[in-house]
Amino acid sequence: MSRDLEQDLRQALRPVDPSAELTSKLLAAIPTKHPATTRSARPWLRQMAVAASILLALGLSWGTYQHQQQERASQAHAELLKALAITNRSLDHVYRAVQSLDADRGHGG
């Protein structure tokens, strides 16, 4: 039974050459002149795309520059805070040394 089904399918799906009438209709439906390309129909479109690309590149460059500046400012701020902390410890040490000398002088030093 499956052989009959296979044979029926092969018979139904066998390649068939198109008729001459179908071929002539298809060839007649193909336009002989090509339609205007989008380039000639819209010459401004390419210029707009180039301008948009340039603006996008400038915007991304500016954004990258701003990000780098912000990173540098953050790093400088962190370094400044570190320097101020070191200065504060140094001044505190000097202040204690001066207070110690004043205390020694006050006690008959």
Image (spheres, rainbow, N blue to C red):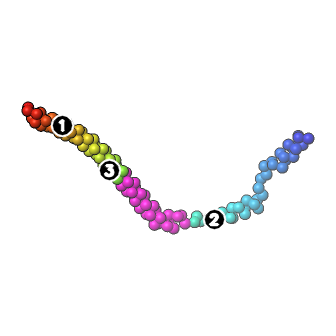
Q: Earlier in the sequence, mark 2 or mark 1?
A: 2
- The residue beneath circle 1 is 96
Residue 71's label in the rendered image is none
Location of mark 3 (residue): 69
Pick the quarter of the image with the C terminus: top left
| Secondary structure category for the residue under label 2 | loop
Please name the predominant secondary structure of the magenta segment in the image: helix
| Front-lying residue, 66 or 24 | 66
The image shows residue 69, relative to residue 55, as above or below, that is above
The magenta region covers 36-64
Q: Which residue occupies 32% across, 47% down?
A: 74
Upstream in the sequence, badge 2 or badge 3?
2
| Res 92 → quadrant | top left
Position of the N terminus by quadrant = top right
Residues marked 2 and 3 touching at CB (< 8 Å): no
As for residue 59 lying within the magenta part, the answer is: yes
Whole-angstrom CA distance, mark 2 to mark 3, is 60 Å
Q: As shown in the figure, which amino acid type bears the numbered disc 2?
A: Pro
User: Which one is nearer the viewer's eye here, 82 or 7?
Assistant: 82
Q: Amino acid at mark 3?
A: Gln
Q: Residue furthest left?
A: 108
User: Which residue lies most toward the right here?
Assistant: 1
- Viewer-nearest residue: 100 or 85: 100
Residue drawn at point x = 78 percent, y = 49 percent: 15
- Please identify, in this view, whether the residue under mark 2 or under mark 1 is nearer the observer: 1
- Disc number at residue 31? 2
Q: Residues within 10 Å of mark 3 (few under 14, many from 20)?
A: few
Could you tell me the amino acid type at mark 1? Arg
Say which element carries label 1. helix
Distance, label 1 to label 3, CA atoms, is: 40 Å
Q: Answer whether residue 42 is magenta in the image.
A: yes
Residue 27 percent coordinates (x, y) = 69, 61
